[in-house]
Image (cartoon, rainbow, N blue to C red):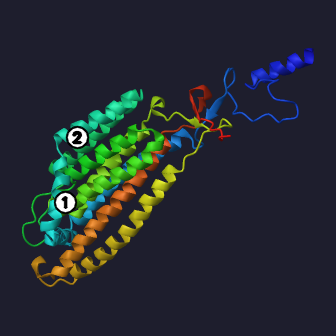
């Protein structure tokens, strides 16, 4: 009797009832609890928290560097200006029909659209009781769009290096920044299982907006990609400071372990695969256009019409590739920083419902 009570006492301290399982059945292993804890705890992630934050900051730094590289290559050099300008001129090919599709997409982007996007994203965060996350999405959307306007008007200039007047600086694209920032705001606030779908839909909408600016000759390809990178930089920055209240609530399987969902892997494969295919087309076109620019004897208007169309199509595919890759990275960083390696009370987790087969 005394030995049984002692065994029950030791089992209770470990969080597992001593007499709940028959002697012939091995007890199910439970996650270890911190000293003095009365309930079992679970560990959601394996990577240390500092590595998660460092990864998010790395995305912010690399994206910021990418913006400067784009400006240096395609705006601050005569060769890059010619390649980018040829893509803009090639947009007149089929513009009459394509503009009927592009104009409605661009008409959506406005100040009221940004405000509505912020309100919806903050509303979702508040409904999920993620107070810090609501502030994060406001900072993301506001910071990204303000950064684009400051970079375009006050930081970057467009020297007159190519033949003819090519206009003032237009890098980064404001329309692309708006579309991407609102899409990512929704990506941050929705539950973990919904993020892969939101990422793919957001990438599709952002790509449609970016390509539409090319169709209307509002922007060049480098402008659109720079707008994407502005949003990517702010996403990495806000994700690096994800608070404990913004973490995902773990869903447990029947053995008490955090349940893994393949949705993020599927979305990553789709987005990275799309980036690879469209990127190959874009790089091939860039190679041909760059060769034509280097062999060019006269001014831009001496280039063949086919070269302009190649530059335009290659630029559009480049926008698709960049959008797919950037959204894949932002999804990965959000999923990574939404978990923690610190123990989480199992009582706060959501058990997976057990479905019994029909008799």
**Element at label 1:** helix
- Res. 94 in view: yes
Left/right placement of residue 79 relative to residue 284 reads left
Q: Is residue 86 left or right of residue 275?
A: left
Secondary element at tag 2: helix
Quadrant into which the C terminus falls: top right
Nearer the observer, 69 or 109: 109
Rendering quarter of residue 96: bottom left
Query: How far across and down, in percent of the image, does residue 44 sit?
Result: 58, 38
Q: Residue furthest front?
A: 359
Where does the image place residue 341, in percent across and percent down from the top left? 58, 37
Q: Quadrant of the N terminus?
A: top right
Q: Is residue 59 visible?
A: no
* In the image: residue 249, left or right of residue 199: right
Examine the rendered structure and indicate whether residue 314 appears above or below residue 29.
below
Identify the residue position indicated by label 1 in the image. 101
Q: CA distance from mark 2 to mark 1?
A: 22 Å
Q: Identify which residue is drawn at 30% across, 60% down.
A: 69
Q: Residue furthest toward the left? A: 165
Q: Which mark is residue 114?
A: 2
């Amino acid at each position: 009797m005394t030995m049984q009570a002692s065994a029950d006492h030791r089992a209770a301290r470990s969080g597992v009832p001593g007499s709940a399982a028959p002697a012939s059945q091995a007890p199910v292993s439970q996650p270890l609890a911190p000293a003095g804890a009365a309930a079992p705890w679970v560990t959601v992630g394996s990577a240390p928290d500092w590595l998660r934050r460092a990864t998010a900051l790395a995305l912010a730094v690399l994206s910021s560097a990418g913006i400067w590289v784009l400006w240096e290559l395609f705006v601050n050099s005569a060769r890059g200006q010619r390649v980018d300008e040829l893509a803009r001129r090639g947009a007149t090919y089929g513009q009459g029909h394509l503009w009927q599709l592009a104009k409605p997409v661009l008409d959506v982007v406005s100040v009221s659209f940004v405000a509505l996007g912020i309100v919806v994203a903050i509303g979702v965060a508040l409904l999920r009781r993620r107070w810090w996350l609501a502030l994060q999405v406001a900072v993301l959307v506001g910071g990204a769009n303000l950064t684009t306007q400051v970079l375009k008007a006050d930081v970057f200039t467009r020297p007159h290096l190519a033949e003819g007047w090519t206009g003032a600086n237009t890098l980064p694209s404001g329309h692309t920044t708006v579309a991407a920032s609102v899409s990512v705001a929704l990506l941050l606030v929705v539950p973990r299982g919904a993020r892969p779908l939101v990422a793919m839909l957001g990438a599709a909408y952002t790509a449609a907006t970016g390509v539409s600016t090319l169709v209307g000759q509002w922007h060049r390809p480098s402008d659109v990609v720079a707008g994407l990178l502005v949003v990517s930089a702010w996403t990495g920055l806000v994700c690096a400071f994800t608070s404990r209240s913004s973490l995902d609530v773990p869903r447990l399987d029947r053995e008490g372990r955090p349940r893994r969902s393949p949705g993020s892997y599927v979305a990553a494969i789709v987005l990275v695969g799309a980036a690879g295919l469209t990127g190959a087309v874009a790089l091939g076109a860039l190679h041909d256009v760059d060769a034509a620019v280097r062999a060019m004897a006269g001014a831009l208007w001496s280039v063949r019409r086919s070269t302009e169309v190649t530059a335009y199509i290659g630029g559009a595919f480049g926008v698709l590739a960049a959008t797919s890759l950037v959204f894949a990275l932002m999804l990965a960083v959000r999923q990574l920083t939404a978990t923690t390696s610190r123990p989480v009370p199992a009582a706060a987790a959501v058990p997976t419902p057990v479905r019994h087969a029909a008799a």
